[in-house]
Image (cartoon, grey):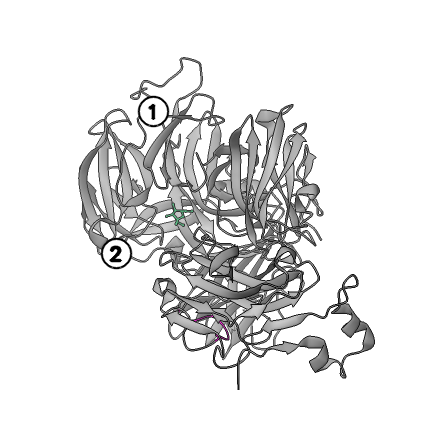
Amino acid sequence: MNVPRFRRCVSLLGGLLPACLSLALIDGASGAEDQVFADFEGPTYGAWKATGDAFGAGPATGALPGQMPLSGFIGKGFVNSFHHGDAGTGTLTSPEFTITRGYVAFRIGGGGFEGKTCLNLLVEGKVVRSATGPNTTSGGSEALEPSGWDVRDLAGRKASLQVVDAATGGWGHVNLDQVVFTDRKPPGQPRTATREVVLHKHYLQLPVKTGAKQRRLALVVGGKVVRECDIELADGEVDWWAPMDVAPWKGSMATIRVEKLPEGSGVLARVEQGDSIRATEPLYRERLRPQFHFSPRRGWNNDPNGLVFSQGEYHLFYQNNPYGWNWGNMHWAHAVSLDLVHWRELPIAIYPREYGDSVFSGSAVVDRMNTSGWRAGGKDELLVAAFTSTGRGECIVYSNDRGRTWHEYEGNPVVRHQGRDPRLFWYEPGKHWVMALYDEAEGKQWITFHTSADLKHWEYGSRIEGFFECPDMFELAVDGNPAARKWVLTAASSEYRVGTFDGKTFTPETPKLPGHRGEAFYAAQTYSDMPDGRRVQVGWGQMASPGMPFNQMMCFPCELSLKSTPAGPRLSWHPASELCLLRREARHLSKVALSPGGPDPLAHEKAELLELRASIVPGEATTVGFTLRGTPVSYDVARQELTVGKRHAPVPLHEGRIELQILCDRTSLEVFADQGLVYMPSNVAEKGKAARYSTVVTGGTARLATLDLIPLKSIWGGKPLP
Ligand code: FRU
């Protein structure tokens, strides 16, 4: 078969189409029928001639190996120059034709490099029109988008089309489908569109459709780009409105600029201004809003950053995409708490310096002795933070106003290396600062230690192999004995090693040990400068909130301790004692017999937010435990193993019983067992459904020596929903 087929839509389908549809294919003004020049539906390119190795033997029918999923093509086949990945190059040239319609319409995707990943219209061997795909930077989308040219001035000329792939780097390919000669104007190439506004409110409200194509948006004030992001702007239905804080420029003229916006897009006109977060459901009370865990009011969060206690406030900075539901546009957002459980969100603390530069993870400390000399002299403590400025290196910023505004150290970056995630701490015996870093030198994964007297000048100390991302390091008293202190080195996975540290070198005394045993905890960090010597850790809770204007959360703060076990000292996790601030009146049961099919003490429990503490004597049972919001928390007696969701962990019976403490929120379960030696944070299976709890016992009778059911209060004020 000769492919692609050159055919006339209407003549081919005419007899089959209802009159209204065939009419719709004809432009009212000129009356000429659309002519499908190429639809790439056959196994070869037919009369089109390929050169090079990028185009393969014929049209593709989907993504090629290593390519992201493709969409936006018509039918099954389309041109895809991703053969041999982005490295492949070549051309694909059509047979000659005569221009008889006013427009050439097509769908194009892939790289956005002029002259290199493009479709050209050639007349007498010269390029008279050219179009590219939309992508030039990493991320982006493989969707083919409708586009076309006005060729009315070329009527009657002989021409050909040429697809060119001359690019070999990222997005070094181009995709094409459905070339149609038409008298109806197709959408032009997407272009930069702007809108002038006088900023008169706190926020610009940007309409977001999660999953829509990402566009680059900038806010320009006085000729300078002051905000910039990649954002899934909603052209049609809006999922949620992302607030862009423009308070610093209130009263100024500004230009909102969006790159590569399809012609006719109404999206810029939809941007609004407002003094509060635009919401369809009350803020912090949304259906899947965690009720006693921190989550950002809008956008995505991942790692906690800069956890530091100062002047009565617990600071929680965190990795935040203010403009999207998914990871991206990394900023340090900021929340504070007076009690570790109730949080107040403050304006974003650290913005990227320029487009493409992200503010990645890091830490903060109080520079009590003013070693850096940056203390302003007021009553406020000097806070110093370190973060990874991608593309630059490890950077230092400081604040003399309780973390509200930050100043860059002019000597940034202070450390350059192949890595990220600086963790600062003070080493008292040596009276110096330490920066623990994740380092990828020599293609391996290290934690590197640097030291400094003044937080500005850093010197390499040592490195240790075997941890990935987000190091943390601290000293703990084994069993609370101040004479028996050990250092713990941990990183994003929460695995850890126990050992000694001399201010420069960590000497491990254990192999790498497992950290948390759940499925939804990562990149945790502990608080600096705690007034009471506690080591409190907050982890990124990887609990998704589908359909919400926010995503992910922070796990409940945990107090860490080192407990001695026959195998040596081990980390243990307990919910921070401030949990008591959330407790309502408990229901206490004791000596409850559990038998398969028997009465269930949880049957009538309706509390939406619940702490459950159980001392379980498995007795004759084979398995015993609970189903909480559809998620199994189940103990296998023979294996002495606890299952939470899909994760398992060994939990030995102590005197014939196990003790569990479980925190249930709308999207999460945090299970503590074996005196905190086993910590299992998990998503709940039934999100957005009314809370349901039950006990589960199989194989024989078990007993709940005690069961405490403690309804918890929402941290967001008011009562939890019924
Ligand atoms: C861990 C991490 C860090 C990085 C940050 C970026 O989740 O990948 O290593 O700094 O997230 O958001």
Residue 571 seen in render: yes
Percent of width and height locating residue 320:
50, 43
Which residue sits at x=69%, y=34%? 274
Q: How many marks?
A: 2
Percent of width and height locating residue 88:
36, 65
Q: Residue furthest right?
A: 19
When asked about the image quadrant of residue 306, the answer is top left
Q: Which residue is mark 2?
A: 512
Q: What type is the residue that disc 1 sits on?
A: Glu
How far, Cα to Cα, is label 2 from label 1? 38 Å
Q: Give the SS element for disc 1.
A: loop
Residue 110 seen in render: no
In the image, 45 versus 341, the foreground residue is: 45
In the displayed structure, 650 sits above or below 441; it is: below
Asked whether residue 63 is drawn in magenta, I would say yes
In the image, 470 versus 192, the foreground residue is: 192
Q: Main secondary structure of the magenta part?
A: loop
Q: What type is the residue that disc 2 sits on?
A: Lys
Q: Which residues are magenta?
A: 59-65
Q: Which residue is mark 1?
A: 410
Percent of width and height locating residue 449:
23, 40
Q: Give the SS element for disc 2.
A: loop
Would you call the spot at circle 1 few (<14 residues within 10 Å), some (14-19), or many (20 or more)? few
In the image, 69 versus 721, the foreground residue is: 69
Q: Earlier in the sequence, mark 2 or mark 1?
A: 1
